Image: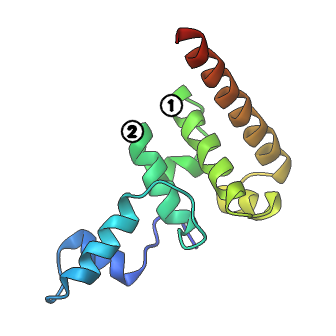
Amino acid sequence: MGVDEFSEEEMTARHGKVAGDSALRDRALARAMDPSPTPTTSAGELAQSIARRHGVAASDLTAHRRTNALVRARFEWWAALRAQGRSFPEIGRLACRDHTTIIAGVRRYEQMQRERLRAAAGEL
């Protein structure tokens, strides 16, 4: 599934064309806004959520540019996909990267998270 592909439910909710089923619209909107990785969250939905939070385009997550914001978003996306139980080769195919690049990126993301926790603990 590509980064820009969404379920029909979500596309309908995003574009306001729900024919009267407000519960369906509410479920789709809640799922679209939830950044937590769950087995029901597709790679594209996850990419959209993370990209939005970092202020980058979801399509840039598979690009070869390396700005700080983009790299952080990309590493977070890879780590979230890994947390869903996806394999490194599978994530590599989604991200248009070699699986060893994904391994290094997930490790770096985990390291950055530990550093952030240490910094936050030091501020208390």
Viewed as shown, does residue 71 lie left or right of 69? right
- Which quadrant holds residue 92? bottom right
Q: Residue furthest right?
A: 100
Expressed as whole percent of the image width and height from the top left, the position of residue 121 reads 60, 17
Viewed as shown, does residue 54 lie left or right of 100? left
Expressed as whole percent of the image width and height from the top left, the position of residue 7 reads 42, 79
For the residue pair 1 and 111, the one nearer the viewer reads as 111
**In this view, 32 is above or below 68:** below
Do tag 2 and tag 1 residues touch (Cβ < 8 Å)? Answer: yes
**In this view, 107 is above or below 98:** above
Residue 3 visible (yes or no): no
Crowding around mark 2 (Cα neighbors within 10 Å: few <14, some 14 to 19, many 20+) is few
Expressed as whole percent of the image width and height from the top left, the position of residue 19 reads 15, 89
- Which quadrant holds residue 18? bottom left
Q: Which residue is mark 2?
A: 55
Expressed as whole percent of the image width and height from the top left, the position of residue 110 reads 72, 35
Q: Residue at x 60, y 35 (%)?
A: 71
For the residue pair 31 and 67, the one nearer the viewer reads as 31
- Give SS at disc 2: loop
Instruction: Give the number of the disc on residue 69.
Output: 1
**Mark closest to the chain's N terminus, 2 or 1:** 2
Viewed as shown, does residue 47 lie left or right of 102? left
**In this view, 65 is above or below 89:** above
- Give SS at disc 1: helix
Residue 122 visible (yes or no): yes
Q: Amino acid at mark 2?
A: Gly
Q: Amino acid at mark 1?
A: Ala
Query: How many marks do you count on the picture?
Result: 2
